[in-house]
Amino acid sequence: MDIYEKVEDIKTKNEFVDFLKVLKKDLAYKSEEWANDNLEAFLEGLYGYSFDTKEEASWKTFAKILLAAKNYE
């Protein structure tokens, strides 16, 4: 299962956490496939997709995760 198929199966917090691990490994081993392979470009991509998407989500939770990642070790 590739990463794009895996994202479609996420239903729980644990599946989301597992996906984050897979995403991190994807960057480490397939960085040549990433157009946004640095933090500034990645955040710009997050902004663009968030602006354009029509999907509903728990935006508050997602924002908290991103904000916490700023300093969380």
Image (cartoon, grey):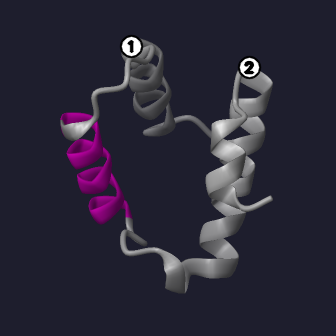
Which residue in the structure is indicated by mark 2? 12
Q: Are marks 2 and 1 in contact (CB under 8 Å)?
A: no
Magenta region's main secondary structure? helix
**Callout 1: helix, strand or loop?**
helix
First of labels 2, 1 by sequence position: 2
Q: Is residue 47 magenta?
A: yes
Identity of the residue drawn at 32% across and 46% down: 46
Residue positioned 19% across, 36% down in the render: 51
**Was residue 64 drawn as part of the magenta stretch in this picture?**
no
> How dense is the environment of label 1, judged by Cα within 10 Å: few (below 14), some, or many (20 and up)?
few
Which quadrant holds the N terminus? bottom right
Rendering quarter of residue 37 = bottom left
Residue 25 against residue 47 in the figure, above or below: below
Instruction: Indicate which label's residue lies in the foreground, 2 or 1.
Output: 2
Compared to residue 38, the image places residue 21 above or below, namely: above
Compared to 32, does 70 lie above or below? above
Q: Position of residue 42 (x, y in %)?
A: 35, 58
List the residue tagged with mark 1: 60
Q: Quadrant of the C terminus?
A: top right
Which residue is farthest bottom? 32
Residue in the image at 45% along x and 14% along y: 58
Amino acid residing under circle 2: Thr
Residue type marked 1: Lys
Residue 40 lies, in percent from the top left, at 28, 61
